[in-house]
C-alpha cells in the first residue's frame, strides 16, 4: 500500500474551527506562560472555554491543552510544567492525581492501514491518587486505575489495572512501560536491576511505596 497524504482530510465543523482558533491564538497565549502563582487564571481561562475543573487544581506554566472542552479535572489535580494534553477526545483525570512535567497525554493517532492515514482518536481516563511522572507518554484509549504510579519517561500503550494493595492502603507502584516485562529478578531493598521500565521499591521481595512518595505529598511538593 502506498501512502497518499494529498487525500488526507479532516473535516472539522466551522464552529469547532472558530472555537479552536479563539483558544489557540487568542486566549491560551495570554495565560500559558504566566508564573505559577497565576494558576487560577489558567484554570479560569480553561473553564471559560468549556473545561470542567474541580476545586484546588494546580496548572503550572507551559501546560498545553488542545481542546479545553474535552478536559475534565476532578479536585486536587496537579499538572506540571510543559505537560501536553492533546485531547481530540476527552481526557478525564480524577482527584489527588499528579501529572508531572513534560508528560504527554495523547488521544490522537492515525490509521496507517489506510493510504490517506486519517486522524483517529480515543479518550484517556486517569484514576485518583495516580502519579504520572516526568516525560510519560500515554497513548489513545488508555485507562489508568486508581493508585498506579507510572515511572519517568515511560510509554503507556495499554490500560493499567489496579495492582494488589500495598502497605498503608496504597496500591503497589505499578508498570511504567506497559509494552515490556521485567528484565531481571528483584533484589532485597532496592530497585529491580536492569528493569528501568518499572518503578517498584522491593523490600523483602514485596512491592512497597517508595519513601516519601505518597500521592498527596507528591501533590503538595509540586504545589510548593
Image (cartoon, rainbow, N blue to C red):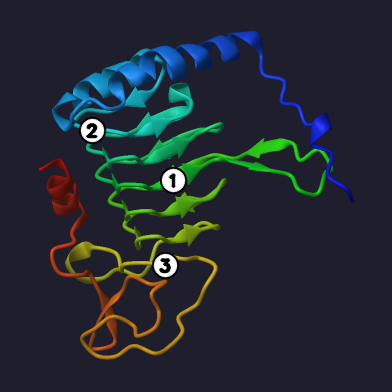
Q: Quadrant of residue 213?
A: bottom left
Q: Which residue is drawn at 76% across and 27% down?
A: 9
Q: Residue at x 83, y 30 (%)?
A: 7
In space, the residues marked 2 and 3 are separated at their CA atoms by: 26 Å
For label 1, count other residues whose C-alpha is less than 10 Å away and answer few (under 14), some (14-19) or many (20+): many
- Find residue 210 and report its horizontal and vertical position in percent: 20, 70
For numbered disc 3, what is the local secondary structure? loop
The crowd level at tag 2 (other Cα within 10 Å; few <14, some 14-19, many 20+) is: many
Mark carried by residue 57: 2
With respect to residue 41, does 196 lie above or below?
Answer: below
Q: In this view, does 217 lie to the left or right of 75?
A: left
Q: Would you say residue 103 is visible in this rendering? A: yes
Q: Do the residues labelled 2 and 3 touch (CB within 8 Å)?
A: no
What secondary structure is found at the residue carrying circle 2?
loop
Q: Position of residue 147 (x, y in %)?
A: 31, 57
Q: Earlier in the sequence, mark 1 or mark 3?
A: 1
Which disc is residue 175 wearing? 3
Element assignment for label 1: strand
The picture places residue 93, in percent across and down from the top left corner, at: 37, 40
Query: What residue is disc 1 on?
Result: 104
Callout in the foreground (1, 3): 1
In terms of depth relative to the viewer, which is nearer, 8 or 145?
8
Name the N-terminal-most of marks 2 and 3: 2
Earlier sequence position, callout 2 versus callout 1:
2
Q: Distance between the residues labelled 1 and 3?
A: 17 Å
Amino acid at each position: 500500500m502506498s501512502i497518499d497524504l494529498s487525500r488526507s482530510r479532516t473535516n472539522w465543523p466551522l464552529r469547532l474551527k472558530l472555537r479552536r482558533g479563539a483558544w489557540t491564538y487568542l486566549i491560551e497565549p495570554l495565560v500559558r506562560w504566566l508564573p505559577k502563582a497565576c494558576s487560577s487564571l489558567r484554570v479560569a481561562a480553561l473553564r471559560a472555554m468549556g473545561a470542567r475543573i474541580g476545586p484546588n487544581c494546580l496548572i503550572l506554566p507551559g501546560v498545553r491543552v488542545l481542546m479545553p472542552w474535552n478536559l475534565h479535572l476532578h479536585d486536587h489535580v496537579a499538572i506540571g510544567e510543559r505537560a501536553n494534553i492533546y485531547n481530540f477526545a476527552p481526557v478525564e483525570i480524577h482527584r489527588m492525581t499528579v501529572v508531572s512535567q513534560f508528560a504527554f497525554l495523547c488521544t490522537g493517532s492515525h490509521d496507517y492501514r489506510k493510504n490517506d492515514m486519517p486522524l483517529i482518536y480515543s479518550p484517556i481516563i486517569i484514576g485518583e491518587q495516580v502519579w504520572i511522572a516526568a516525560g510519560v507518554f500515554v497513548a489513545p484509549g488508555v485507562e489508568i486505575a486508581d493508585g498506579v504510579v507510572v515511572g519517568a519517561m515511560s510509554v503507556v500503550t495499554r490500560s493499567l489495572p489496579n495492582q494488589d494493595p500495598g502497605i498503608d492502603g496504597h496500591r503497589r507502584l505499578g508498570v511504567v512501560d506497559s509494552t515490556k516485562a521485567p528484565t531481571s529478578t528483584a533484589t532485597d531493598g532496592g530497585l529491580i536491576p536492569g528493569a528501568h521500565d518499572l518503578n517498584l521499591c522491593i523490600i523483602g521481595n514485596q512491592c512497597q511505596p517508595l519513601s516519601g512518595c505518597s500521592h498527596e505529598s507528591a501533590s503538595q511538593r509540586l504545589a510548593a
